[in-house]
Image (cartoon, grey):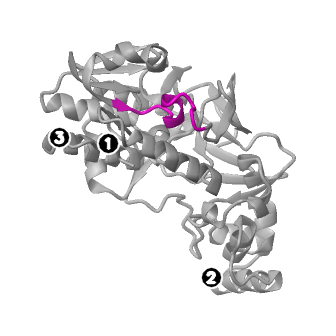
Amino acid sequence: MYDYLIVGAGLYGAVCARELTDAGKNVLVIDKRSHVAGNVYTEKVEGINVHIYGAHIFHTNLPEVWSYVQRFATFNRFTNSPVANYKGELYSLPFNMYTFNRMWGVVTPDEAAEKIEEQRKAAGITEAKNLEEQAISLVGTDIYEKLIKGYTQKQWGRPCDQLPAFIIKRLPVRLTFDNNYFNALFQGIPVGGYTAMVEKMLSGIEVQTGVDYLEDKEHWDAQARRIIYTGPIDAYFNFSLGTLEYRSVRFETEILDKPNFQGNAAVNYTDAETPWTRIIEHKWFEFGKDEQGKELPKTVISREYSSEWKPGDEPYYPVNDEKNGKLYQAYHALAAKEEKVIFGGRLGEYKYYDMDQVIAAALTCAAKEKTSKEDCHGM
């Protein structure tokens, strides 16, 4: 009999497992996949740490979270500065003075601000009612048409005027020449990849992979006093109230016999005609070198295609509209009645989480379990 069964060996599950084990609890971790680390899983290909489930760049303003991950990995100094490709025209992301200069030829912040205001007024927007209006009010019509509209419609599978404004409210817009996408105190990539970091978190803890908890739920429930479940909340209840919607991502990854394909870790293709949303060149997360500082002769790229989720696909981004919000709240009410089970993480809470938020939530959950014994559904 274990004190805790943790379903899912991603960041949420691994942090809870580490904290509870260190507190003297007997913990078993199981995962449906054949590996640990969840969606941050990296795999070595041609000496390159390939982000199998899409690019993950660690960034946080939380000193306690940054300090925590330093226990398990050394982080490099990678700064996320994506490039936008609109039909062969290249623009700096996030939107900054380099972007505005390339788009309009403006040189000063005042000129850029005047251009944005001029286009916002011309569009007649007073209060943004959807994503399209919110984007135009932030950066003007030209940038919206070239760098936001096509990309966003590919990403979400819906016209921009049918998407809520809040999706783009955190879009970085700067009247400076700062092209660091994340305005965070701490940022980087773990040297050696995320898998090695999570394996270190799980060091000395019993882990079983290739195990589907929901296929034999009664058996696994009997193994532990408490359960931390990080899978989809609707799947836990056998979709009894309906299916929550997600956006999914498909990857086409290839090895190229050349040292450099695009010269940057991420290039977004912002026109509607290009079928993929972006291309990731994985070696540039670690400056094109291996752990010993040796230049790598080949490169690995992944084209990303956004799609509507269907059973069998990996769920990535919750569709946070009114319909799905109500359905989640109904599942949340069911979850609150599961006295033995804690629902956590991106899928368990049907919530878009950055990595640092996942870790912070897991630390909070584990702390509650260690001290008050209260159920920390985390929702």
Q: Are marks 1 and 2 in contact (CB under 8 Å)?
A: no
How many C-alpha atoms fall within 10 Å of the one at disc 2: few (<14), some, or many (≥20)?
A: some
Give the residues in magenta. 228-241
Query: Label 3 is placed on what type of residue?
Result: Lys
Q: Residue at x 60, y 40 (%)?
A: 244
Query: Relative to 152, does residue 275 appear above or below in the rendering?
Result: above
Q: Nearer the viewer, residue 30 or 234?
A: 234
Asked if the magenta segment contains residue 290, the reply would be: no
Query: Residue 72's x, y, as percent?
Result: 28, 34
Left or right relative to 325: residue 90: right
| Callout 3: SS | loop
Judged by depth in the image, the label closer to the viewer, 1 or 2, is 1
Residue 292 can be seen in this image: no
Judged by depth in the image, the label closer to the viewer, 1 or 3, is 3
Query: Relative to 47, does residue 314 appear above or below in the rendering?
Result: below
The circle drawn on residue 373 is 3
C-alpha gap between disc 1 and disc 2: 41 Å
Q: Which residue is mark 2?
A: 109
Q: Which residue is mark 1?
A: 362
Query: Residue 144's x, y, as percent?
Result: 76, 66
Which badge, 3 or 2, comes first in the chain's sequence? 2
Q: Residue at x 77, y 86 (%)?
A: 121
| Callout 1: SS | helix
Query: Label 1 is placed on what type of residue?
Result: Ala
Q: Nearer the viewer, residue 317 or 287?
A: 317
Q: Are marks 1 and 3 in contact (CB under 8 Å)?
A: no
Left or right relative to 345: residue 103: right
Left or right relative to 106: residue 315: left
Query: Residue 259's x, y, as percent?
Result: 64, 30
Which badge, 1 or 3, comes first in the chain's sequence? 1
